Amino acid sequence: MTQDALQRLIPSLRARTLAWWLAIEDALPGGRGRRSLWSALIVLVMAVLVTLVWLAGRYEASQLQAELERDTANAVSDLRTQLSRHVQALQGLQSSHPSEAFWTLEAQSLLRENRDMLRIEWRDPALNLNMMADSLLRSPVFERVRRSEALNEAQQACLRAKRSSGPSYSHSYFLPQTDGLGMEVMDMCLPNTQDGVLVGFTVVTYGLQELINARLGVGYGRRNEISFTEPDGTRLAIWGNQSRGLRLFTAQQLVDLPGNTLVLRMDGRRGEPDLFPNVLTALVTAMSIALVTVMVLLAKDSRRRLKAENDLAEALAFRKAMEDSLMTGLRARDLEGRITYVNPAFCQMVGLPAEQLTGRNAPMPYWPPEMVDEYKQRQAIRLAGNAPPREGFESMFIRADGTRFEVLIIEAPLISVQGLQTGWMGAVIDISEQRRIEELSRASQERLQATARLATVGEMASLLSHELNQPLAAIASYANGSLNLLRDPAASPQNMDDVHMALRRIAEQAGRAGKVINSVHDFVRRRDQAREAVAPQALVDAIAPLVNLQARKLQVKVHTRIESKLPQVMCDRTMVEQVLLNLARNGMQAMDQPGNLERVLVLQVRRAASSAEHGWVEFSVSDVGAGIAEDVVGQLFTPFFTTKPEGMGLGLSLCRTVVEQHGGHLGFEPLLPRGTVFRFTLPAVHLDKIAA
Ligand code: ADP
């Protein structure tokens, strides 16, 4: 476990509380509830906004309507003012008792000034026409229809005027014209009294169309359509063209005249763009857009936040799962050495719950009592920062049940997000099992080695007996010869010399037999594990007698080629001898086939050729035997694999183990045209090392 990994775990511990909160929040009404709340909020805000826009639109419409109403009211009042001015002007015309010529002049001037007056008549109290003047601005109105035929309305008005002693207006009526069209006109009758006596009437005929044109058209007709209508909506006179637009606003007002009531109607059209120019609408719309944007941003932000929270919770859950399933014990300590955190693996290791461990300081409950002092010192050194960081050290812990176990502790400084050291993080690995397995495998290796050696020795016993036969037979025959010579009564000094010679031979042969036995004895007994610097020659020499024993039996010639000035090799001498012996024996056995006439075994030692193995010494054993069959190659180093009836199949597997323990490599390759060569390497002792 690296320091980085340890440090990464710490923030996760701190954030675990947050993870719990998130989990609780998730358990509550949950994401679905939150979503529906959001939907409700969005719907509400949308509804409010739509209502606001609608209200603003309506407000604007009502503003327009009010404006139109105002215009209509103003128009009516303007109209009434104008009409009453006319009345005054006409009264002026009558009161001056004019001569006929003067009257005509005055009336003409009035008609010129007021285009809406079509004709002015001066009638006597019986309504007979005295004088009249037609407007010169147009053709006379009573041309197609005579005045006498259309006098009815005027008579009615004059009756009313007489009764009320004031001006009275007639109902409007249609008057066909010479151009084939017609027009709606209205008469106004003004009684003329002198000293309270009715002396006549002034009757003015108004054209309704001209009334609108002259009095209202300029002021109000630009944006609106102005018309006089009957109560049922029939238009009597109209001004202004219908401008195109979507929305029509209408306002009506009664023009209450004495004797007649006209309906003035104004139609105003306002198009779509009118929805926006209004400041309020624009403001509301802009605010709505801003509000919606803010809401969208908020929703986005909240979604991002939610995702981040989920990711965080997931990451935390993953880390927690990782921590809990970790086989390695984790232990965090603060700068005073107090335990701040332990993971489940650590609790399990020492057999104590986390509550009993966190907050504890030296001596820890898992320290063996006799080691407390030593461990305290060690901890003090570590806390003082004098120990190399991230370096593992082995230690002994004690479980709650009293059993002891070995651990490997790797401790590293705990660095906070701010870059300050807040304590120490340690990974604790229980290595007792590993140690036990190592010990077991070492013991079984040793046993296997011993077994293999004994097997070799067993094999050699037969060779020994064969080899000892010769010296023993020689000894026996020399002894018998000597006895015979000594038994001879006529023993001559010559005989004594022979006896001496025989005894010497006996001694020689006995010595030879002893050497044979000793070489085997040495080989079996020597169990020196230590590595030492050995000359390659010495290794070859040590196995030579045993190799020769077998070579003689199998009629094999053994050639030994040792490069000159070879460095010594660093090795476990006994083991390497065993390897050489195994390989030599295998080679010789491979050549032991009937009909195989060339039986040469070459033992060669030289410096390793490849540059990668510079500083290594290569041993090779080559034979000209049968070679290794394809199907055998894969299993060659498998323990207990053998093709020989009396074989154990352990030789090569042990050889490889031994060579690899020395850091070397054991391999083989076929020799052409026949045979096999086995090679292995051993590290050379460097000269400078020896000098040192
Ligand atoms: P053992 O010699 O007891 O059979 P080894 O592990 O030494 O066990 O050898 C395994 C097998 O490898 C042998 O049985 C043999 O078939 C084959 N072998 C080993 N060395 C040679 C060799 N030089 N030439 C041919 N075959 C060999």
Image (tube, helix red, strand yellow):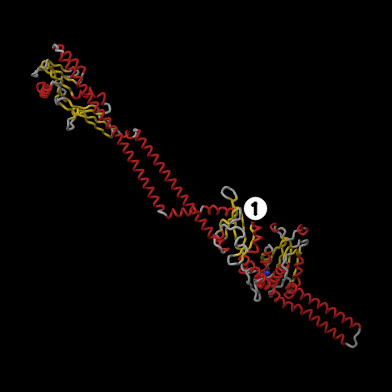
Q: Quadrant of residue 360?
A: bottom right
138 relative to 589, above or below = above
Which quadrant is the C terminus positioned in?
A: bottom right
Above or below, 66 relative to 21: above
Q: Quadrant of residue 620?
A: bottom right
The amino acid type found where label 1 is placed reads: Gly
Figure quadrant of residue 296: top left
- Looking at the rendered image, the quarter that the N terminus falls into is bottom right
Count of number-bearing discs:
1
Disc 1 packing (10 Å; few <14; some 14–19; many ≥20):
few
Q: Residue at x 76, y 78 (%)?
A: 468
Residue shown at 35% from the left, 45% from the top:
43
Where is residue 636 shown, x and y percent of the image?
A: 63, 68
| Viewer-proximal residue among 319 and 629 | 319
Residue with the most extreme left position: 126
Q: Residue at x 85, y 80 (%)?
A: 503
Q: Which residue is mark 1?
A: 385
Q: Nearer the viewer, residue 21 or 540?
A: 21
Q: Position of residue 381 (x, y in %)?
A: 66, 55
492 with respect to 116 (left or right): right
Question: Which of the two residues, 470 or 341, is positioned nearer the viewer here?
Answer: 341
Dot 1 beta carbon under 8 Å from ligand 1: no
**Is residue 601 visible in the rendered structure shown here?**
no
Q: Secondary structure at mark 1?
A: loop
Write down which quadrant ligand 1 falls in: bottom right
Q: Is residue 247 above or below residue 128?
A: below
Percent position (x, y) of residue 606?
Answer: 74, 62
